[in-house]
Image (spheres, rainbow, N blue to C red):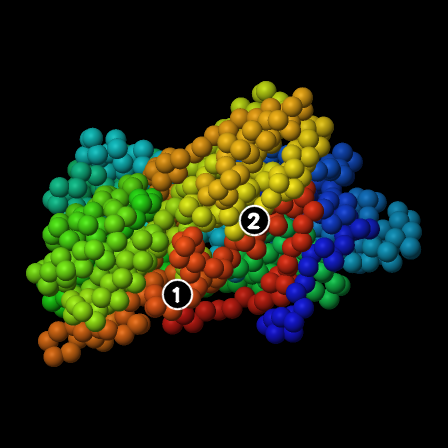
Amino acid sequence: SRSTMDHQPKFFENLSGSGKAIGVLTSGGDAQGMNAAVRAVVRMGIYVKAKVYFVYEGYQGMVDGGDNIVEVSWESVSSILQVGGTVIGSARCKAFRTREGRLQAAYNLVKRGITNLCVIGGDGSLTGANLFREEWSGLLEELAQKGKIDEEAVKKYAYLNIVGMVGSIDNDFCGTDMTIGTDSALHRIIEVVDAIMTTAQSHQRTFVLEVMGRHCGYLALVSALACGADWVFIPEYPPEEGWEDSMCVKLSENRARKKRLNIIIVAEGAIDCHNKAITSEKVKDLVVQRLGFDTRVTILGHVQRGGTPSAFDRILASRMGVEAVLALLEATPDTPACVVSLSGNQAVRLPLMECVQMTQEVQKAMDEGRFVEAVRLRGRSFENNLNTYKLLSHKRPDAELPKTNFNVAVLNVGAPAAGMNAAVRAAVRVGITEGHKMFAVIDGFEGFARGKIKEISWGDVGGWTGQGGSILGTKRTLPAKYLEKIADQMRTNNINALMVIGGFEAYLGLLELSAAREKYDEFCVPMVMVPATVSNNVPGSDFSIGADTALNTITDTCDRIKQSASGTKRRVFIIETMGGYCGYLANMGALAAGADAAYIFEEQFDIRELQANVEHLTEKMKTSIQRGLVLRNENSNENYTTDFIYQLYSEEGKGVFDCRKNVLGHMQQGGAPSPFDRNFGTKMSAKAMQWISKKLKETYRKGKVFANTDDSVCLLGIRRRNLVFQPVAELKNETDFVHRIPKEQWWLKLRPLMKILAKYKTSYDVSDSGQLEHVAMHSPKEAETGAI
């Protein structure tokens, strides 16, 4: 779709907003991250010289006018990035549903010359906005007839442009992979589940948890996947007839297997196949009556809407806010109202009404009992979640499992990363389901050489999703110096395939093993790597397991540090992050924490740049925002160390601001994995295991497995919108081995975003945005290769 645009890149500096006025409002139920979106719209709007107005209290404020519609400045949105909810308020508005209400709203906007609206809300809010846009010219005519505005205004403000962003914790909007607030809501749910698990463990209890989602089971499904729940009830996929029996059988089997607790998750809109409600109380009574288990119900309620937004939601909302302003600048009377959204890792624009219609189709399918259709309409990421959950939660009886006689070994390599254990769990369980015998290797390649390898069962990995670090143990050691011994172990244990979960060392390790194939037949087996490292520096994948958790740690810490600074005034903090030579954590952490600058290795900086940053902060101290935050990647420059930068800032800032420094260190590798990392680890690993099964079938000849082509040693990565298996040999050209980073990194494109939001002049290539796409119905086949 971009062939015509490839020749000349499009830069946002060439787009001007002068003479335009943008109104921003939040409407419907609140969601964490709405403030980040508001902040991005305001700052990007002001940056391109447009006027930006807050519309307080959603549509109600638009109808009431007066002080509810106010022009805002750059500082109006400082310090709101880390606040949950919406600072400009949101209200349900009956008046806007009437034509009189909309007439009044149109009058209030025209009076201020606002013809661009950015609406952040759910599908109801966006549908309302679209209707308003369709009626706009009629409303202006009517205002002119009543003598409220003159004919010139009718001509001058003839068109209303609308761009929507979906803020809804339910993730119930079709066409968008993730809505603003969903990830944060999952954080709240997972925090609660982790806490409940410890008390349930003590008392051998069963817990029934009710989560939000009246018409959409996304939160219930993903949290069930992320905490390994025993059973989940969602509206899109009602249980089969007689589910009461099968659920009770499963719960009692689990107890028999020495599992001390059961977790059952119920979406508030859960139904059975006759469209009758399944409530948490009903589930509890059933368990008590049939099994006599000590059972408790916990209803999470509005906790899920509260709290600070996660790093993911802040970055998502900031990206979307900037994209929304671009879409408004480029809108013409002929472009339909659109929503900006992320598909995979790509910002896209979709026609608003197509999304709304598709969202309503799902509800219709559910009402009519077409549940398979409902799941498909929800999109490929939902379908993937459901399939993975079904695969991992329920162990089939041994008699029903296929027997392949293949042995597959799993190991962790490199530094620990949160989510590794979720990946191991998924690998083991999918492997067993596919009929293989699974082996766990302790302590990476070093442990492998020493024969630290044992068979691992379905039950052994129970409860692993929520554990941080690496339970198997992990080492940075590379296999090259142990080749002989590792080959011996492969032969002794008759290992037919290898799955390596780890960071850059895991990638180097696979390169070494495949090079050793000439000498050792033992290594002529399928091998796959799943990237897991906080640094996110592995070639071939946009994300790696563990990076999201580390990013949240950085963001939380920065929030606290900023708070300490707001008390003392005029203070600048310099914070050092991990990542080796890869600037991902520093750059994305800066975007999520609202930092003023981020120093990274990939973008060389010199003394002039440091001086410009100091001057920038000096200017900032004259405003009402009297604190600064600067992130520095640990290896960004060997001479401009964290100490050097701290001393330079201290000297140059004398009399204007003082400085403090903070090295975050190993806390970035620890902690319970975030919902994203649990989920990402689980799904990547399940896919990788299915690939191994396929390769084992293909390479099994005359009673043995023999694989020696490049495509039998792969790395599984997510690239833009797809999961792809790439031969490690082909990734060599994309790698800078000296600095252990990919030669090209997608997130560098987001670097200008942070600078724009921190008020630096910068160039920003926006060639990628601007194409209006259509909401595609995916085919069932696509769901297998599809997005996370």
Q: Residue at x 27, y 36 (%)?
A: 197
Mark 2 vs 1, N-terminal side: 2
* Identity, as a three-letter code, of the amino acid under mark 1: Leu
Q: Secondary structure at mark 2?
A: loop
Q: Observer-nearest residue: 579 or 88?
A: 579
| Quadrant location, the N terminus | bottom right
Q: Residue at the bottom extreme? A: 702
Query: On the image, which quarter does residue 266 sit in?
Result: top left
Q: Nearer the viewer, mark 2 or mark 1?
A: 2
Residue at which label 1 appears: 731
Q: Residue at the left extreme? A: 492
**Structural distance between the alpha carbons of marks 2 and 1:** 25 Å
Q: Is residue 364 visible?
A: no
Q: Residue at x 58, y 20 (%)?
A: 567
The picture places residue 415, in percent across and down from the top left corner, at 31, 45
Q: Secondary structure at mark 1?
A: helix
| Number of marks drawn | 2
| Quadrant location, the C terminus | bottom left
The picture places residue 345, in percent across and down from the top left corner, at 49, 57
Mark 2–mark 1 contact, CB under 8 Å? no
Query: On the image, which quarter does residue 670 sit in?
Result: top left
Q: Observer-nearest residue: 775 or 139?
A: 775
* Identity, as a three-letter code, of the amino acid under mark 2: Gln
Few, some or many residues within 10 Å of mark 1 (<14, 14–19, 20+): some
Few, some or many residues within 10 Å of mark 2 (<14, 14–19, 20+): few
In the visual, does 545 lie left or right of 604? Answer: left
Q: Is residue 153 visible?
A: yes
Q: Residue at x 34, y 44 (%)?
A: 418
Q: Observer-nearest residue: 102 or 221?
A: 221
Q: Which mark is residue 604?
A: 2
The picture places residue 87, in percent across and down from the top left corner, at 62, 35
Q: Observer-nearest residue: 752 or 140?
A: 752
